[in-house]
Amino acid sequence: MTEVDLLTLFLLFLTGGFAGFVDAIAGGGGIIALPALLAAGIPPHQALATNKLQGSFGSLTAAINYSRKGMMQPGSLMVGVFFTLVGAAAGTLLVQYFPPNALEQTIVVMLILIFLYTLFSPELGKIEKHALMDKRLFYLIFGLFLGFYDGFFGPGTGSFWTIALILVLGLDLRQATAQTKLFNFTSNVVSLALFIHAGLVIWTIGLAMATGQILGAYVGSTMVSKKEVKFIRVFFLIVVGATIGKLLLT
């Protein structure tokens, strides 16, 4: 079993807090937490598993806080949750047989397009608009697709959910951010369950970071409920840009 000293554990706790804060606002907490785990000397497969543990706590905290503040109603999103769960299970199982690195170039291009579209669309997500697709059909299609993608590969999932909810369902940026956390939590838990079954999670480190995630996610999700859309948009652009950079430099 991999062990770390108390100072490293404390630094990972702080990292979890910052990752939870950023993730609650714009997604992308994994690009902060996962490199920190690897830098602490955690083997890659255990780092991925432990990252899912701590990230699940953060996305759950944010989702609960958004629900309490009336920014989403989980009961009305169960169709999306179900198909995200199915898609994530399929992706997590399939990734064991195929190299996910083959997806990177396509994903980078898609994220660059999202970044540019958001950058040059200052009114994006400011107000709620008419949906372009029936909600149940949307959650079936995007739940399966993005759930599968998150289980198979992962980077940028939150960004894809947010932009899809805005462009296709017409949600404003606050609502889209809130719903994204529930779907992120769903796909995270599926992957986590499989990692736990494989015995890859480092519980001491994961729970220390999860504590930070809970605190950071609560603060971040509270800020989203109070700040203007412009604040969330800037954070979203920063996170998408950082995700692009990480994929290009990996």
Image: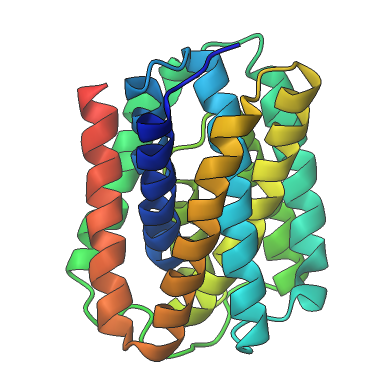
Q: Position of residue 77 (x, y in %)?
A: 75, 70
User: Is residue 12 found left or right of 47 in the rendered image?
Assistant: left
Q: Is residue 28 above or below residue 95?
A: below
Q: Residue drawn 33% across and 84% down? A: 229
Q: Position of residue 21 (x, y in %)?
A: 40, 62
Along the line of sight, the residue nearer the viewer: 131 or 104: 104
Q: The C terminus is located in which quarter?
A: top left
Numbered-mark total = 0
Q: Residue drawn 51% across and 36% down? A: 154
Q: The N terminus is located in which quarter?
A: top right
Q: Position of residue 33 (x, y in %)?
A: 40, 39
Q: Is residue 226 above or below residue 51?
A: below
Q: Residue drawn 55% across and 72% down? A: 178
Q: Is residue 239 visible?
A: yes
Q: Is residue 111 above or below residue 34?
A: below
Q: Is residue 142 visible?
A: no
Q: Quadrant of residue 11?
A: top left
User: Is residue 66 found left or right of 215 in the rendered image?
Assistant: right
Q: Residue drawn 34% across and 42% down? A: 32
User: Is residue 99 found left or right of 125 in the rendered image?
Assistant: right
